Amino acid sequence: MNCREFRRKHDAYIDDTLSGVDIEAMGRHLRLCAHCAALDTRIRRSLLLAHNLPSIQPSAAFTERLQMRLTHERALKARQHATAGLMMGMMTRHRSPFSTGTYVALATGIAVAAGLTMSVMLADDADPTIRLAPVVASAPEPEPSPLATPAMVASMPAGMPIWGAVYVAQRAPWHLASDVTGR
């Protein structure tokens, strides 16, 4: 498992909705990757903090006060629009609902998001390659006996007296075996 796959499945890992194989792979990756282990720790601590916050209880009159405030703000906004309409007169100029600064901030946010997406996609999350120690032969492998070919061995059931003959023929010098086979 690489870091990208770990981050993609992390929410399900925390919610414990992954299969047993995926949970084992995620746990193994956590033990091997310090960066992902730190990410997991930060997320779990923030969730623990959010779960332990006290619940907020609004006052009994909260809903009434909220509705009155919303009604007041709607009336104020309607008066501002009416005043602005009178001041504009009969001009039919289209006005954007956002200011230029809002558009600049929006474009900057999109550019930053695109840059972050590209940096994540181009990041090298290659799994570390497992390298085994080289194997060194201490003695050359003996030549196989013509009587002990895989076809011959597969055709003989276990417990047949031919096995003793095959073993002896395999251990015999090559010139004896070639005389037996007719070569």
Image: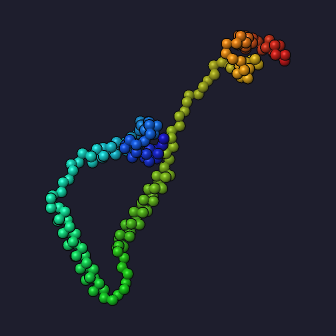
Residue at left 47%, top 45%?
Answer: 5
Q: Nearer the viewer, residue 33 or 166?
A: 166
For the residue pair 74 and 81, the one nearer the viewer reads as 74
Residue at the limit of the structure toward the left, as seen here: 60
Name which quarter of the figure residue 35 lies in: top left
* Residue for point 41% across, 66% down: 107
Q: How many marks?
A: 0
Outermost residue on the bottom side: it is 90
Quarter of image, res 45 = top left
The residue furthest right is 182
On the rendered image, what quadrant is the C terminus found in? top right
Residue 71, percent from left and from top = 21, 71
Q: Nearer the viewer, residue 107 or 95?
A: 95
Q: Is residue 152 left or right of residue 51?
A: right
Colour approach in the figure: rainbow
Relative to the observer, which residue lies in front, 97 or 128? 97
- Residue 77 vs residue 117: left or right? left
Residue 28 in the image: above or below residue 57: above
**Picture quadrant of residue 85:** bottom left
| Residue drawn at the location 70% of the way across and 12% of the way down | 160
Task: Where is residue 155? Give x, y as percent.
Answer: 72, 20
Rendered residue at 37%/44% (across/down) = 15
**Left or right of 11: which side holds 121?**
right
Q: Is residue 103 visible?
A: yes
Please say whether residue 32 is visible from this viewpoint: no
Residue 58 location (% of width, % of height): 18, 57
- Please give left or right for residue 177 compared with residue 30 in the image: right
Q: Position of residue 40 (x, y in %)?
A: 37, 43
